[in-house]
Image (tube, rainbow, N blue to C red):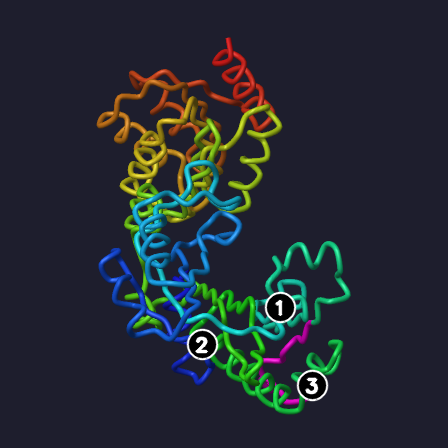
Amino acid sequence: MKLHEFQAKDLLAKSGIPTPQGQLVKDSDQASKVAQTIPGPPWVVKAQVHTGGRGKAGGIKVVHDPDEMIAATKTMLKKSLVTKQTGPEGVMVRQVLIETGVDIEREFYLSMVVDRATAMPTMIFSQAGGMEIEEVADQTPELILKEHIDPTTGWMPYQARNLIYHIDPIPSPAAVKLLTSIMAEIYKIFMTLDCSLLEINPLVATREGNILALDAKIQIDDNALFRQKDLHELDDPEEKDPLELMAEKYQLSYIRLNGNIGAMVNGAGLAMATMDLIKMAGAEPANFLDVGGGASEEMITKGFEIILKDKRVEAILINIFGGILRCDVLARGVLAAAKNTDIKVPLIVRLEGTNVDEGRRILKNSDLKFLVAKNLTDAADLVTKQVKDEGK
């Protein structure tokens, strides 16, 4: 679950990590009053959307008088912001954060993630703050510093020194003390709130000697939300794709993509392999949809309906290995969905496993026209044929 910048900063501030003074605004009338309550000029107007790359896309503007502030707010609100992470359709800006400007002396990058290679929480620190960390890692990897943290001991003070004293130049003693304190708090927040990502970019040193989280991003592990009920209330459904929201309601793992071949699969690994298969066939997957090993007929039905609601889908590949999820259950779910939906795209089905003969019999005896694949290779060939036929 992703949090907005203003929500992430609220959590940081509650833990004693300084952030710029700011106010959330949802219309231009509110913006006209901000100049009276937030110190400035300058001020910074920031679109609150779940995507990175806002600055380059015009989603962050520095303004120097109230009229500029109002104009920048009007420019962003109720408009689609297109970044390199959103795709051409962009995301709608429904609120902006207006903050006091900061006199920056130096920028750092600070984050916490779980390193899958070591299976340990890991703090990442860099003196190249304000830049996209992927670019830094690609162009100057020596500037990326990491500390793996043993959960049995937790964050240790020497680990902060390992990070801070390896940057050039080393910050002042006062700044070192502040950075050390912030790093300890970041680890505590990351573990306590079950975060999958906590990122401050940039974490800035001001000319007045303060350390501030100028931007913040927090993602919460969905699997831990059952014990983070207060955080669950921070979820913003308007930032999610409507089909993803529908899938979430029925506990389906669905991610909408930009391709033309819908896919329904059981098991994340098989889903990834199926997406590769679609791309090898010369097409693009329209979605990631894992109905899971314990999917019911209703879940199958809803999953099928979700795929069909995507107007970009030109064909559907159903790739099921019947283990926990029996092939006959899948077949009945597909037929149930078909009764409620006008199917106008080709259906390619590959079934193997438990009750596969029964599943195939159910599909064969239905009124629907299925292209039945004998194996994965055959499924790829059928997808390729559909792509070529659609291109004619």
Identify which amino acid the numbered label 3 is placed on. Answer: Arg
6 sits to left or right of 128: left
Query: In this view of the protein, which residue sits in the foreground, 146 or 87?
Result: 87
173 sits to left or right of 233: right
Identify which amino acid the numbered label 1 is placed on. Answer: Ala
Tell me the residue that label 1 is attached to.
119
Tell me the residue at 41%/64% (across/down).
Answer: 5
Helix, strand or loop under label 2: loop
Q: Where is residue 33 in the image (x, y as percent from the top left)?
A: 25, 67
In this rendering, is residue 25 above or below 343? Answer: below
- Disc 3/disc 1 C-alpha distance (Å): 23 Å
Quadrant of image for the N terminus: bottom left
Q: Position of residue 291 (x, y in %)?
A: 40, 44
CB-based contact (under 8 Å), mark 3 and mark 2: no
Tell me, for residue 57, which label it has, or none. none
Toward which corner of the image does residue 47 lie, by quadrant? bottom left
Toward which corner of the image does residue 278 lie, by quadrant? top right
- Disc 3/disc 2 C-alpha distance (Å): 23 Å
Q: Position of residue 227 (x, y in %)?
A: 35, 73
Tell me, for residue 19, which label it has, or none. 2
Other-residue count near label 2 (Cα within 10 Å), few / some / many at <14 / 14–19 / ≥20: many
Q: What segment carries the magenta color? A: 146-158
User: Overall secondary structure of the magenta stretch?
Assistant: loop
CB-based contact (under 8 Å), mark 2 and mark 1: no
Tell me the residue at 59%/63% (across/down).
Answer: 130
Tell me the residue that label 3 is attached to.
161
Q: Where is residue 324 in the image (x, y as percent from the top left)?
A: 43, 46
Query: In this view of the protein, which residue sits in the foreground, 47 or 386?
Result: 47
